[in-house]
Amino acid sequence: MQKLRYEKPFIQKMNAGLMNKFGTRTEYEPVKQIDGVSVKSMIEKYGSPVFVISEQTIRRTYQNSVKAFKTRYPKVQFAWSYKTNYINAVCNIFHQEGSWAEVVSGFEYMKALGNGVPGNKIIFNGPEKTNEEILLAIENDSLIHIDHFDELYQLMELCDQTSKKPRVAIRVNMDTGIYPIWDRFGFNYENGSAWNALTKIAASGKMTLTGLHCHIGTYMLSSNAYAIAVNKLSDLAFNCKSQLNVTIQYLDLGGGFPSANTLRGAYLPASDTNPTIDDFAEAITSAVLNAGFKTDELPLLILETGRALIDDAGYLLGSVLANKRLSDGRRATIMDFGVNILFTSFWYEHKISPAQDFTHHTEDTVLYGPLCMNIDVVRETINLPLLNRGDQVVVHRVGAYNMTQWMQFIQMRPNVVLIDGNGQTHLIREKEDIKYIEQLEKMPTHLSTINLK
Amino acid sequence: MNLKKNIATSEAGFIFNPSTGDSFSANPMAAEILMHIKQGISIEAIKKIVLEKYDVDASQLDRDWDDFTIQLKEGNLLEN
């Protein structure tokens, strides 16, 4: 006789009062496959946990975003934000699509060069650039975005060591109505520092002032702030033209567009609150077109969008290690992935779907990672079906920042797999092993033996 | 393990505690187990019934039984 399907026994207290207007269920269907490849087969082949990236989703998201801007403005260039995800295979998908590279360190700069990005298509941002890195960037004709006066003077001194004239821009920070103001990077617009820097660059005669850059925040929920930023950058550009006789070639509006992830503590889901890429494109391009540039002097519009282009394409597949009941009666489930590899769980209420069939019974659950550390909480509370040890889940929208900010802490980092447009899987970053982790360690001779008999 | 005498249960999985006014809904597995408990069947005998009838191994059932006991205690449904 065939046995009946089992589900662990479970009772739920019924609470009187108003119903939750947003409903209680988060998941109705299991997510058994990604781009036609079964979750189970990927875990079997590559282990659990494993990051999975959809090439198809990256290309589609990129093309839609570029289209949103190019249908509204004639001169648009995207530059892939390396810090968001700098696995080389991921970067090269963006470069194949036509994206330049935007880097914020010498390490990222070398990665971009290694990926074959021509030097003159690399934007070098960030507050730390060594002399060697700046000289290399000058040699390669890269766009150097100056962050502070010390860097400006450093650059002026280095110009004497080379016959090449570097192409530079300054990063500008400003009040766009978003608080707190992101004023730690770049030169302030309102207090005159930005203009002061521009005049020094022009007066030095050693550099070619090429563009103006800003990056007004991250996970921006207002498209209008970008229009304010465009107006302030445009004001600087007009002053460069009229007072310094310099034509600004490009305005770089940076990034900061949100993905569809819901921020921790948000009252409404992100899909209901976040502006779309079209909203941002409309605000930015309208502001540039209405700023007063002559038609033949319209600046190139550069965008360094990271998160919004990659988050949706990334998944984390994992498995249940254990269930337990906490002292207050809540269920806790321990997963085989934690904040060590899912850094964004500090910011987001990640959507998590079971990868196998489940019944309609659900329970509020605390989702912990495997680390023996109190901070390792993936979700403070999530309504999930009753999961057993070994059951698999899919964490959605993890493509941005996790594969760069992940920590080798207690556990090692897992495999990263790419699903190409034909549904084939490719290992694009191997999981770490102890040999890899320890290869940089050195043992002093007097510590090389121990005796614990 | 004994349920409090005044606890009302239904086959559909509704549980009512008249002394506290609390009500609970049970999934079918929990409802069946509660029905057996109310009939005075021993824990070992209930586990045997479940193992014979459902697709679950003894180890998993033991773990889930312990968890279920905590839920019943938490709901103030068991005799002390």
Image (spheres, coloured by chain):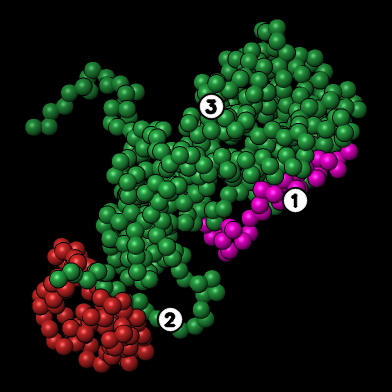
Chain colours: A green, B red
Are tags 1 and 3 found on a single chain? yes
The residue pinned by badge 3 equals A108
User: Percent x, y for residue A200?
Assistant: 79, 22
The magenta segment: A264-292
The residue pinned by badge 2 equals A15
User: Percent x, y for residue A277?
Assistant: 66, 48
Q: Quadrant of residue A233?
A: top right
* Count of marks placed on residues: 3
Task: Please tell me which residue lies in front, A395 or A379.
Answer: A395
* Label 1 secondary element: helix
User: Percent x, y for residue A169?
Assistant: 73, 26
Q: Name the amino acid, label 3.
A: Glu
Circles 2 and 3, Cβ within 8 Å, touching? The answer is no
Mark 1 or 3, nearer chain start: 3
Classify 10 Å Cα crowding around label 1: few (below 14), some (14-19), many (20 and above). some
The chain carrying label 2 is: A
Q: How far apart are the alpha carbons under marks 2 and 3? A: 53 Å
Are tags 2 and 1 found on a single chain? yes
Confirm whether residue B31 shows in the render. Answer: yes
The chain carrying label 1 is: A
Residue at left 39%, top 67%?
A364
Mark 2 or 1, nearer chain start: 2
Q: How far apart are the alpha carbons under marks 2 and 1? A: 43 Å
Task: Please tell me which residue lies in front, B63 or A298.
Answer: A298
The residue pinned by badge 1 equals A224
* Label 2 secondary element: loop
Q: Is residue A246 above or below residue A187?
A: above
The chain carrying label 3 is: A
Magenta-drawn stretch contains A346: no
